[in-house]
Amino acid sequence: MNRSLRLLLLLAVVAAVGGASSFLTARLVAGSARPAPAGESDVCTWACAQLQLTPEVTKAIGVVRARYAPRRSAINAHLRTANVALGSAVQEEGAWSPRVAAALEDIQRAQGELQKVTVEQLFELKSAVAPGQYQRLLRACSETLGQNCDDCDGKGTACETPAKSQ
């Protein structure tokens, strides 16, 4: 095989790996492997629907969600940009490098911040709903988070839940 053909083949492989990496990262960032039930765009909307809330409570929840929306939007925009940077780094570097590691670390920091904002919002909802509804909302969110690790050890066993602190 001549040198030009080998270089072209190498370029095609690197481009394919970069594209696949960007696609997979985007899928991970966009949401869990299990989407919310049919027709629902996010877990909070779905969980709130399960609580059969009054219009007043729905409005109060909307106020809380609106307060967090700019932060969530900014983090999601950053994640989209960071995914593009990761895809470029993978494609251009062609191997593990400080640039690839930095891009992944940036994505992980942003994902952690998004999770933190989501949990802060969840806890703030306590003031907007009745105690029984809040407990059901917490249970629904906890179960949804648990769905993301049904087989976290690769052996078909569910993740263990940490013991409740006393």
Image (cartoon, helix red, strand yellow):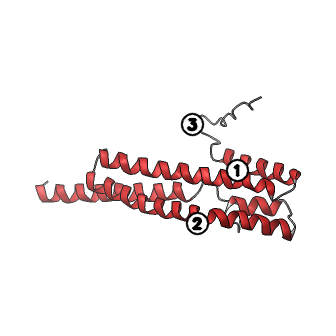
* Of the image marks 3 and 1, the number of the one nearer the N terminus: 1
Residue 166 visible somewhere in the drawing:
yes
Residue denoted by label 2: 70
Residue 156 relative to residue 142: left or right: left
Secondary element under disc 2, as helix, strand or loop, is helix
Residue 99 percent location from the top left of the image: 31, 49
Nearer the observer: mark 1 or 2; the answer is 2
Is mark 1 in CB contact (under 8 Å) with mark 2? no
Residue denoted by label 3: 154
Amino acid at circle 1: Thr
Nearer the observer: mark 3 or 1; the answer is 1
Q: Nearer the viewer, residue 126 or 3?
A: 126
Mark carried by residue 127: none
Secondary element under disc 3, as helix, strand or loop, is loop
Nearer the observer: mark 2 or 3; the answer is 2
Residue at x-position 73% and y-position 54%: 124
Secondary element under disc 1, as helix, strand or loop, is helix
Q: Nearer the viewer, residue 122 or 83?
A: 122
Residue 27 percent location from the top left of the image: 51, 58
**Quadrant into which the N terminus falls:** bottom left
**Placement of 157 over or under 44, stated as above or below:** above
Q: Which of 18 and 61 is in front in this view?
A: 61
In whole angstroms, how far apart are the C-alphas of marks 3 and 1?
A: 19 Å
Residue at x-position 36% and y-position 58%: 85
**Quadrant into which the C terminus falls:** top right
Amino acid at circle 2: Pro
Residue at x-position 36% and y-position 48%: 102
Residue denoted by label 1: 144
